[in-house]
Image: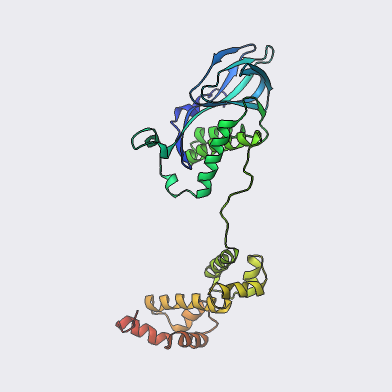
Amino acid sequence: MNGRHNELERRDIRFRWGDYGFRVLRFHWTTFAPSKTVPFHKHAEFEFHFIPRGKGLVIMDDIRHPFHEGMFYLTGPEAEHYQEADAVEGMDELCLHLDFVKLNEHPPNEAGAQYSAVSGEWGMESEVEEAEECVRLLRSLPRKPAVDQFGAMDCFMTAFRAWSGNETGMYTTIKQAVIQILLRSVRAYGGGQAEPNLPTRDMNAYRVQLACQFIQANYKRPITLEEVAEKIRISGRQLQRIFREQGMGSFSEYIEAVRLERVCGQLLESDEPIERIALEQGFASGNYLYYVFRKRFGTTPGAYRDKARSGALKP
């Protein structure tokens, strides 16, 4: 970032996270010469101050707080504070000025309308809750420096590299870097959810989904129950039971159904011989395809093709 301290401020970065619209007002690196002071002042927004080099002190609520390399502090809206660099070392500071609003608290065409709603329309409920919790904690963080133990400072470099390198997905990378600065800052003060609130899965339905995806990708070759079970880390007996419980029939019946579906499609779309279609779609032989096809549909593959092409086949 040397020599390009204010590069990220060239972008008007606004994004939606959960039910909040965020706007990055300043995002830069600044240097304090030894003994430099910034008189008491306050901002209308949140400002994160990270110290990658040097040391100094900040006064908030009439309390002097020394800090050093690897620490940070947060000054919230209307929080009056004074800053002073060390008399010998001076210091560098990574700054993030950020404002946010609760989008559903603003009528159309007012503050909430400034922020993109694209990502929020289909965001997960857990993301909404996490953003809400993060904002709540930010508003209640103590006014004193803390150690950047979770590497929020690293996110400044992530954002800078995305911008300076014009990376694919630059906007998303910067957005996520800002969100990570917020989350890691909260964690540094001991903030966190009592219990994870991630969505839960029906594990049996999930295992069947994984098994079906594997089968559909590999149905043209011989597949065994044990092979698929090993892929999803359960026993073959357990997988067979889950298939039946989920209304899929047996494992072999599902594979057969997948292959027959592909055979029907190929019968309608090509004039290839039945024997070749059988082998291409995973059946051991044309004779075996005749057997399972008649058992399933009550007709032969050839008759199915003829009826379909003549329009006599009922949908």
Visible residue check, residue 200: yes
Where is the C terminus found, in terms of image quarters?
A: bottom left
Q: Where residue 262 sits in the image (x, y, percent)?
A: 45, 75
Residue farthest left in this picture: 311
Tell me which corner region of the image, top left, top right, bottom left or bottom right, holds residue 226. bottom right
Q: Where residue 29 sits in the image (x, y, percent)?
A: 56, 24
Report the residue at 53% width, 80% height from top: 283
Report the residue at 38% width, 34% height from top: 114
Tell me which corner region of the image, top left, top right, bottom left or bottom right, holds residue 115. top left
Report the residue at 55% width, 31% height from top: 139
* Residue 68 in the image: above or below residue 153: above
* Residue 192 in the image: above or below residue 284: above
Q: How many marks?
A: 0
Visible residue check, residue 177: no
Where is the N terminus found, in terms of image quarters?
A: top right
* Residue 287 in the image: above or below residue 14: below
In this rendering, would 127 be left or right of 300? right
Q: Where residue 46 sits in the image (x, y, percent)?
A: 52, 27
Report the residue at 47% width, 33% height from top: 100
Task: Tell me how the rendering is colored.
Answer: rainbow
Q: Compare residues 114 and 276 and report the one nearer the observer.
A: 114
Q: Where residue 193 sits in the image (x, y, percent)?
A: 62, 43
